[in-house]
Structures are given as C-alpha cells and as structure tokens.
Image (cartoon, rainbow, N blue to C red):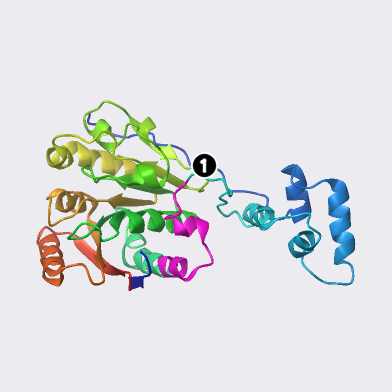
Amino acid sequence: MSLKHSQVVRSVPLPIPRQKSTESGRLIGDILMDAERLKPVDVDRIMSFQEGTHVRFGDAGQALGLLTEDDVRYALSVQFDYSYLPEDCLLSRELVAAYEPASQVVEDFRALRSQLMLRWFDTGAENRALAIASAGQGDGRSYLAANLAIVMSQLGERTLLIDADLRRPRQHKLFSLGARAGLSDMLVCRVGPEAVVNIPELHDLSVLTAGVIPPNPQELLARQYFSTLLQSMRESFDVIIIDTPAAAAFADAHTVAVRAGAALLVARQGSSSVPKMAQLTQSLREFGVAVIGSVLNDA
C-alpha cells in the first residue's frame, strides 16, 4: 500500500476518554446559534432563502454572506461527532488527516487503517500496540505515525500516540505541545501518567511526547519498566501507535517493536535502501515481531 506525501506499576490510571457527542440530531442553525456564530434573525433569513430553492442550510448561509466555510465545517463536525480544527489552530499542517479529511491521501490512510484493524488490532485483546519503523532517516515515520493515530481516533478508537524516538523526536512539534515531560521522564519515574496529553481538537486522541532527550535512550527502552508501562496502557487504550528512530542507525526501533509485538515498516520511494529494508524485516521477524506490512511514502 502506498501513501502520497507522506517505576514499576501494576496499573496506570490514564486519561478517561470523553463521552460521545449527542448532538447529531440538532439542526445546523441551532448549533451555530449556540456557538454564537449566527443570530436568530440570521437563521430566519437563511431559511427564507431556502424556500423554493432546495439548497442546503450551509450553502444558503454562505450565499447570503452570513456563514463561512469554516462555520459550516464546525456545525457538521458537531452533527457527525467529527474532529474540527479551527482556522487558527496551532497543530502542524502535516496532520493532513485532521486538516484535509476529503483528500486522497487521507483516503489512503483510511485504507491503511482498515488493513491494520483486520490484520492486527482486531485479532486479539493484547494486539493493541504497533511500532512504526523504517531503516533510514527521513522516511516519514513521524508523519505516518501521527496521521495514522488521527484516523484511528476518528474511528472512535481510544488512541494513544507515543513518541519513542528519544533521539530526534518530532511529535511534540506536530501537535504543538512544546517542551514537556514525556516518555523518557516516565521511564526514570520523574513523572506519572499525567504526561499523557489529550488533544482537545482531536477526539479520542492522546499523545505521549518523547520528553527530555536522555543520554541513554537504548538502555531506557530496554528496561522491563517500558514493557510494564505499555501493558498498563493497553488496559486504557484500544490503539497505541509508537514512533521510533531510524533502525539502521540505532537499535531502539527493534527494542520498541519487540515490546509492541508488531511493526509497520515505512520506506520512501527513491530514497530508502531495499537491502536495508529487507534486513530490517528479517531481523524484526527473528526477534518475534509480527511485521504487519509496509507503506511506501511519495508513491
């Protein structure tokens, strides 16, 4: 499948996901009035315009200059219990699954999601974690991990995105979370589950950033506590997506994949080394990791 662009604890009480919306039966006009995006008199004007034209409320409102496309997107997101990102949102534009839900690249992510649900996440209660791995730098692991986590959460799955790249982390930048405590800090027991952050704009999605870049990332990830931590997270989340560093340069990715139990491999067309990808696949399987499949970026 190809994508275009591209401290020991027995149980960690992680964030409780929000309750599902009950707004689906409400009219767009009511939603926008409650949000103070429309006044009652504006609703009356739009409804009068609709009479005899059979145009939708949103289209009529835009034709009259009373609504913007952003207003309509907001109302639809409430009606259909779907993530909404306002125009001034600080999340990175690389999160195409959130910004461009109707694009072909996001359809490709949805197709990938379906395959992963069938091949891994729906095959057993323990199969909830998936490492995103590649051989080289710049193959698009972080981009893919972030957008895959978003489309998983859009399915209603309680999703956790973990940045286990303790060398060159990116997820804190993509989600505008700044410098904060994260995975590395949890692994040395400096912080607890409060390091896991719910993303308000994206329903059912939480992120655990890499945290402070440590001098010994491989040793931290190889400790038994990482396994214990992941097991606790499996009890609170349906899907756990884990970003990793380049496998050809560091052993971290293998360690994370073994802890997760499964890996999705990423390659970039015209850049990734086929022999290195083959070697990565073989070595992961020798460690008992289920290689679920591979994704080609920039196809």
Query: Is residue 146 shown to the viewer in this render?
Result: yes
Front position in the image: 66 or 19 = 66
x then y, percent, for residue 239: 37, 52
- In the rendered view, would you say 211 is above or below 283? above
Q: Amino acid at mark 1?
A: Pro
x then y, percent, for residue 211: 29, 35
Query: What residue did someone put label 1 on?
Result: 200
Q: Is residue 278 magenta?
A: no
Tally of numbered discs: 1
Within-10-Å neighbours for mark 1: few <14, some 14–19, many 20+ = few
Quarter of the rendering occupied by the N terminus? bottom left
Q: Residue at x 38, y 34 (%)?
A: 13
Q: Left or right of 73: which side holds 213? A: left
- In the rendered view, would you say 186 is above or below 4? above
Q: Left or right of 217: which side holds 161? A: right
Quarter of the rendering occupied by the C terminus? bottom left
Front position in the image: 220 or 142 = 142
The residues colored magenta run 91-110
Q: Residue at x 54, y 67 (%)?
A: 102
Query: Is residue 9 shown to the viewer in this render?
Result: no
Front position in the image: 6 or 202 = 6
Q: Left or right of 233: which side holds 205? A: right
